[in-house]
Image (cartoon, helix red, strand yellow):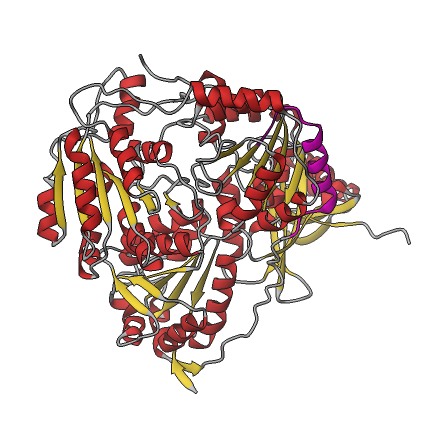
Amino acid sequence: MAFRGSGQRTSRSDIIAKKMNSEERHIFSVLVENRFGVLARVAGLFSGRGFNIDSLNVAETHDRSISQITLVTHGDTQIIEQIYHHLNRLIDVIEVTDLSTDTHVERELVLIKIATDNPQKRTEILQVAEVFRGRVIDMKPASLVLEITGDEGKLKAAIDIFNTYGILELARTGKIAMLRGSES
Amino acid sequence: MELSGAQILVDSLKREGVEYIFGVNGGAAMPIFDALYGETEIKLIPMRHEQGASHAADGYARVTGDVGVALATSGPGATNLVTGIATAYMDSIPMVAITGQVFTHYIGSDAFQECDIIGVTRPVCKHSYLIKNSDEVADVVAEAFHIAKTGKPGPVVIDIAKDAQMHEALFQYPETVDIRSYKPQVHGDPAQIAKAAALIKEAKRPMLYAGGGVVLANASEELRQLTLKTQIPITVTLMGLGAFPETHPLAMEMPGMHGSCCANYAFTDADLVIAIGARFDDRVTGDLSKFAPNAKKVHIDIDASCIGKNVPVDVPIVGDAKSVLTELNKQVSTADIDPWRNQIQEWKQKYPFEYEQKSDKVMPQYVIEQIYEHFSDAIVVADVGQHQMWAAQYFKFTEPRQWLNSGGLGTMGFSLPAAIGAQLGCPDKTVVNINGDGSYIMTIQELVPAVTMKLPLKIFIINNMYLGMVRQWQELFHGKRYSAVDYHDNPDFALLAQAFGATGLRVEHTEDVVPALQKAKGITDGPVVIDFIVDEEENVFPMVPAGAGLGDVIRGLS
């Protein structure tokens, strides 16, 4: 309690710092018991051990006793390995899959509310929305709400463009993903 | 038959073979304490502080290998358990901590003595449960014990709302536990074990590095077989002491910050390190970039997340130490490494643990040596600090579960309550508590139950009137600025012991050490406290300074 030297922390962070160059983005699918407190355990693991969460999505699966957490994170090989093992160590975690190690599909949905001050601007926005296969789900005289689905690159491009028109509000689901089906 | 949730809890604990519950009563746990009233199969041990209850449960678990049980009320009772829970978590000790919780309809309302103990303990326990209904109690207890003692053991918290303790439900104890999301891997991958055996065969300078996992897995016998069969030198960590007899010629003693020069030099020169139930803790490795730089590493551990956490590993083997070593032992033979063995023997002889008689004061190391002379078969429970390191260095442990200490969390105040748990777990053994003057006073109140139960504990205080280990760091790294470590205002511990109803002795001269220990040996009807007033500024050596490599170990200041 009273004796708690700083120890070798520096050299460990040195090693970690060296590895920063080789950081990779990983997307984990985590199946968990659909139970009170599970998300807190997962989130607490990340904050407690200094791992990063870039995006997080949680929802019930077709089996109501199981929830799926889709979690995007980044780190070098050693950190990613640690994340994998620590997730597995949680008692309520049923299965952890690092989707990045195989071909997978990932999607995210974004809702964007954009100001439409005049009819010409609205027409332009609708044309751009078309390019991104966006759907209008609400339209008011001064604004409209678009729904766009896609992978990270597509959504970034869409948001960048719509930003030039003035985004009033934006909400996104966080990524969900799954492995592609097998060939046979 | 319908029983109250509290009665179901007690009956479930009986089904798990619980002998003792260490607890402190309070509002939200009263139905449980009521159910324990007059209970003969489970003995309730009232402690004087909840921290004492959790350490006592921990000490009991460490000596017996069974699950220790602590019990407290909600709010402050529960938060007082936390240090003990965290201590057990860091050292992977099987424990179930039960806390009362406010009525379910009060949860979340900031009710009197309400605390989200599930939230508080989440990062320091293996798992936790909040029980809101009486009919969940039996299943939760069965799961909690299963989780606490299997895989990598650890503490499990059960928080049980007061109404769930009071309402009645049908008692049906599950015959088996099957948790689909929890299947610890026991057996190691045969291909990996074969790889390890091949590396052992090729190595010219191999060493075994065994930790607390060997003790937890009850794998000391298999470790001894591996060592004797291969004749490979072995170092056993602070947490593993006793897993291999330190009196054996192949034993290099403890590695790390205050470990033997021999073990540290061996790491630096080895070409193969076989880690078994050890986790490359920073206090063992020193500067990671200089740690065992020439060695391939085999790492056997039940916890996959421990492998590769600090040090890259060439051959990872996930599995139970007992199972993996049993397989490995079939594939190894005597290693042809005479020059390396000779080198180890040379280091061992050249650099033993040693100290100087610096003044006319009692030297702390001398006290430990004499404790060893008089109580070599005893269970030793140490606290945290200089005395802990001296005890680890100068007491030669030969059996697993003979040495208890808070190695991971380094919890001062651990030892006295843990010694109580150890004595109850092993009533036929002598239990020696080696304590410091700083740590002793942190949980001194637990002398009360020790006296009440007439436990013949030998409590030896290595009293240097300082928070000694911190003072040592201040001397070496902070220009002797002794900030907040001067404990010359300590009370007279001998008199204080007498006030508690224990025997209290004070030893100030070297020639009085042995007679006092002999006297302590003869006292069997209650605890004896000996306050050894020792040299105030003696330091623990050898020492690997923080941030240095193991090869840069300082053997002493002179």
Q: Which residues are magenta?
A: B187-207
Q: Residue at x 86, y 52 (%)?
A: A182
Q: Residue at x 42, y 26 (%)?
A: B257
Residue B366 x, y percent position in the rendering: 26, 30
Placement of the C terminus of chain B among the 4 image quadrants: top left
Please say whether residue A75 is visible from this viewpoint.
Answer: no
In this view, the residue in front, A66 or A86, is A86
Residue B53 x, y percent position in the rendering: 30, 56
Decide if residue B548 is on the left or right side of residue B412: right
Decide if residue B109 is on the left or right side of residue A47: left
* Above or below for B498 versus B350: below
Please say whether residue B396 is visible from this viewpoint.
Answer: yes
| Residue B104 among magenta residues | no
Q: Quadrant of residue B361?
A: top left
Residue situated furthest top in the rendering:
B558
* Above or below for B272 versus A80: above
Placement of the N terminus of chain B among the 4 image quadrants: bottom left
In this view, the residue in front, B304 or A89, is B304
Q: Main secondary structure of the magenta part?
A: helix
In this view, the residue in front, B64 or B545, is B64
* Above or below for B384 versus B361: below
Decide if residue B176 is on the left or right side of residue B96: right
Residue situated furthest bottom in the rendering:
B1
Residue B6 x, y percent position in the rendering: 36, 75
Q: Residue at x 60, y 35 (%)?
A: B308
